[in-house]
Image (cartoon, grey):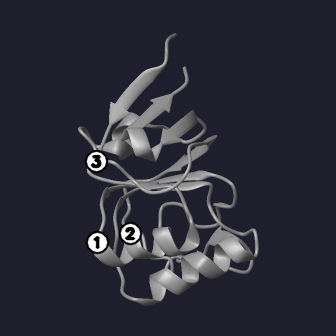
Amino acid sequence: MSDRIVRAHVGIGAPVTATALVASDDFSARYDLDRVAGVFSRPAHKLYGESYVGRILVLNTAKGGVATAWMLYEMMSRGMAPAALLLNAANPIMAQGAALADLPFMDRFETDITAAIMTGDEVTVDPAAGMVTIRG
């Protein structure tokens, strides 16, 4: 198989390669995560119980409010953050939180990113180029 490339709006942060963790659910750093244990903690979330630490999170859309910014920063400062965050749609607060945390972040893909990437795929995120490479 060959690598697949998906393009998006130019994002935030440095390039990173890691294993993907994917769900079509929406995402809130405040309501979906146990930020101490490093797992999804909301029972209704499709990734419930899964560790997000060091993984490239691929989810549908941002939800929640201003607490996201400091929560992403706090997770990064403790080494308990995802490697990157990819969303089909984000809000300014999620983008600000990713920038504050220095977390690689992209949104507005040319296709549904939750359908293009599968959990377990090795993915390279290059925010400055607006490009995600899926190994396979």
Q: Which residue is mark 2?
A: 95
Q: Nearer the viewer, mark 2 or mark 1?
A: 2
Is the residue marked by circle 3 packed among few (<14), some (14-19), or many (20+) residues within 10 Å? some
Q: Secondary structure at mark 3?
A: loop
Q: Nearer the viewer, residue 12 or 59?
A: 12
As rendered, which of 47 and 67 lies closer to the eye? Answer: 67
Q: Amino acid at mark 2?
A: Ala
Identify which residue is drawn at 35% across, 39% down: 115
Q: Specify whether 9 is left or right of 1.
A: left
44 sits left or right of 121 in the view = left
Q: Relative to residue 80, is residue 117 depicted above or below?
A: above
72 is higher (above) or lower (below) than 89: below
Q: Is residue 115 above or below residue 30?
A: above
| Whole-number angstrom distance, CA of label 2 to CA of label 3 | 12 Å
Q: Quadrant of the C terminus?
A: top right
Residue picked out by circle 1: 91
Q: Earlier in the sequence, mark 2 or mark 3?
A: 3
The residue singled out by tag 3 in the image is 9
Residue type indicated by callout 1: Asn
Q: Is residue 86 above or below residue 122?
A: below
- In this rendering, position of residue 44 left or right of residue 49: left
Which amino acid, mark 3? His
User: Does residue 30 appear anywhere in the picture?
Assistant: no
- Numbered label attached to residue 47: none
The crowding category of the residue bearing disc 1, from other C-alpha atoms within 10 Å (few below 14, some 14 to 19, many at least 20), is some
The residue closer to the viewer here, 8 or 116, is: 8
Which residue is found at the position 73% from the left and 81% from the top? 36
Q: Are marks 2 and 1 in contact (CB under 8 Å)?
A: yes
Residue 77 visible within the image: yes
Pointer 1 and pointer 3: residues touching (CB < 8 Å)? no
